[in-house]
Amino acid sequence: MNGVRKVIEKAAYVLSILIGIVVANSCTLFNIPQQTAPAVSTLEQAPTAEGKQNYGSYLAGRVAHIRHNLNKAADYYKNAVDFVPDKQMLPSQLYIILTSQGRIDEAVAYAQMARKKGDESPFIDTIEAINLIKHGEYQKAIDTIGKTNNPIAVTFFNPLISAWSHAGLKDAKKATKALAPLAANAAFRPLYLFHAGAINDYLGNTKAAEAHYTALMNIRHMELAVFPLQVISNFYLRRAEPDKALRVAGLALNKDNLMMKTVIDDIKKADSNIEPILKQPETGLADALFSIALLLQQDGSNADLSILFASLSSYCSPEYPLPRLLAADILEKRKLYAEANQAYRHIGPESYAYYTALFQTAKNLMQTDNTAEAEKIFRRLYTDYPPNPDILTNLGEIARIEGRYDEAAKFYQKAIDRYPSDSVTETWPLHFAIGISHGAAGRNDLAEKHLRKVLKLKPNRMTQNHLGYTLLQQNKKLEEAFELIVSAYNPKVADGTVTDSLGWAFYKIGDYEQAVRYLEAASNQAPSEAVIYDHLGDAYWQVGRKREAVFQWNHALRLKDNTGEFERQLTLKKLESGLEKPAIPSFDAKQIEKQVERLKAKENK
């Protein structure tokens, strides 16, 4: 639901301040505990074999924690938890980690242990309550969260948990009353209306359910996310009111998203014999917990807690895919790509989120240089789903990374063809990618053609630099090449690619001293680019620094080429035979001097 976004964002800010107490006595999920490792004598109450084994388990847990293998870390910590000193709060770390990994039944025992050791987090009550609800102990869950006096828990978390617990007891009146704190806050009113409607829907109170659903949909600019869209349309379909179900579909958030399109198509195909979505209170509670996780995720400092609520949501309803997507998104932002893919593996082919899970899995495989597996997935998506520019673009990226430049250019062009002709924002990067692919394949004339098109569509420094460099490689239009590269150059920005082009431009006109100056700077700005060190070696050779040239060429050979421009065989030949003085292409010295003056003016600002 998106109709009161600004108000909710403000509420999320307040929430981010108040919620700090929830994890103040715990640990973060993806960073190791901050205390230093204790000395062996601190952990070992006696120098027994058992003590040493438990100390080893603790250290092994810390190593697994550092490596983000949280399930293994939890298993090791469990072996050590009865042995470490109280000050290490290992039970607190354990219940947080176990909850994040969906091991809620195990987490409860360590949450209770942490409470006895002084952990005052109200999140302990939340874990216990969710565990009780999952096992049908609704009244015990209500009693458990009723003990919590944390303000944000009382006004936000607990109303949702308590309401669905009362729904489990078939008490609509108490369930609606439990939601009252949400109704009092304008930011949470859409959440209140949906869950009040859903609880009455689940309990068969159709008149009350429709009243709440109607009030929700009548909020100005209301847009419905996936689950509310499914539940409310399901309500009207079961009542044989397809027109109202289609009206609900018209309020969908992000209608062009493939996942949402799938949901809308399912609504259009369904009839009145459709099964109810809300068959048990845990299904509604799962969405309530997901809403909490989503709100917490808006503030990056609460990302760990967001993952925890997402895990509780998945625990309540394992087939509900959105918490998995949310957790994976947070992990991706932290560059924990393998861990994100673990979350995606729980989303099966029957889910409306399956495409998203597969697509993101492939993207993450690319981030970890597993392009072969990523390509298999993208090709599968290309076959099984309507072709779209995103799939084609990624297939082009993989082909370019692997040096299949003709194939890359074809995929990029197919992606361009999928966009409307006026989609400049989407197509200019693809024309740029085609130009880069042609340049890497040595087809500089085609590279020039596409890069010039980009400059017409969307002038930018990156394209100026690459077009200038392409002209240098062809030894033509050196005056224009200099102008483009100087325009792209910003002395306040450490951009090794542009600085390398500038150094190479001086090299091409025979000013080797200046070439050395800029190429040395480029090597510092981009220390992993092979082609820059190769260029620097060439410049060193021309100024008589031949030992340093040999060193730079050897260094270039040891680096991975990310550009497609580094020619290993030519560099090996230079190491054998040295380098001849290059022929200097003809150029207009006055025009070049004009650009050099522009360059000096930029640097002197």
Image (cartoon, rainbow, N blue to C red):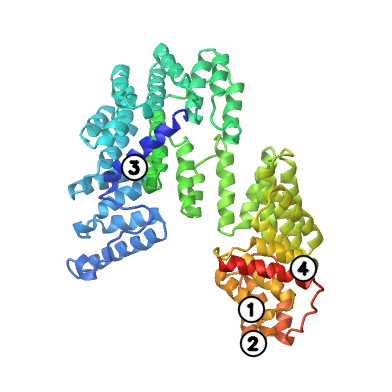
As shown in the figure, which amino acid type bears the numbered disc 3? Ser
Task: For marks 2 and 4, give the CA distance.
Answer: 26 Å
For residue 51, above or below residue 322 = below
Q: Position of residue 108 (x, y in %)?
A: 28, 43
Say which of marks 1 and 4 sits in front: 4
User: Is the C-beta separation of discs 2 and 1 under 8 Å?
Assistant: yes
Say which of marks 3 and 4 sits in front: 4
Q: Position of residue 79 (x, y in %)?
A: 29, 57
Q: Position of residue 117 (x, y in %)?
A: 18, 50
For residue 587, above or below residue 149 = below
Around disc 2, counting alpha carbons within 10 Å, would you say few (fewer than 14), some (14 to 19), or many (20 or more)? few
Task: For marks 1 and 4, give the CA distance.
Answer: 19 Å
Which residue is tagged 4? 478
Around disc 3, counting alpha carbons within 10 Å, would you say few (fewer than 14), some (14 to 19), or many (20 or more)? many
Task: For marks 3 and 4, give the CA distance.
Answer: 56 Å
Per the image, label 1 sits on a secondary structure element best described as: helix
Position of 254 with respect to 544 (left or right) is left
Mark 2 vs 1, N-terminal side: 1
Say which of marks 1 and 3 sits in front: 1
For residue 60, above or below residue 123 = below
Around disc 1, counting alpha carbons within 10 Å, would you say few (fewer than 14), some (14 to 19), or many (20 or more)? many
Task: For marks 1 and 3, give the CA distance.
Answer: 51 Å
Which residue is tagged 2? 545
Which residue is tagged 3? 16
Mark 1 vs 3, N-terminal side: 3
Determine the image quadrant of residue 514: bottom right
Q: Residue at horizontal 53%, vertical 21%? A: 248
Position of 22 with respect to 427 (left or right) is left
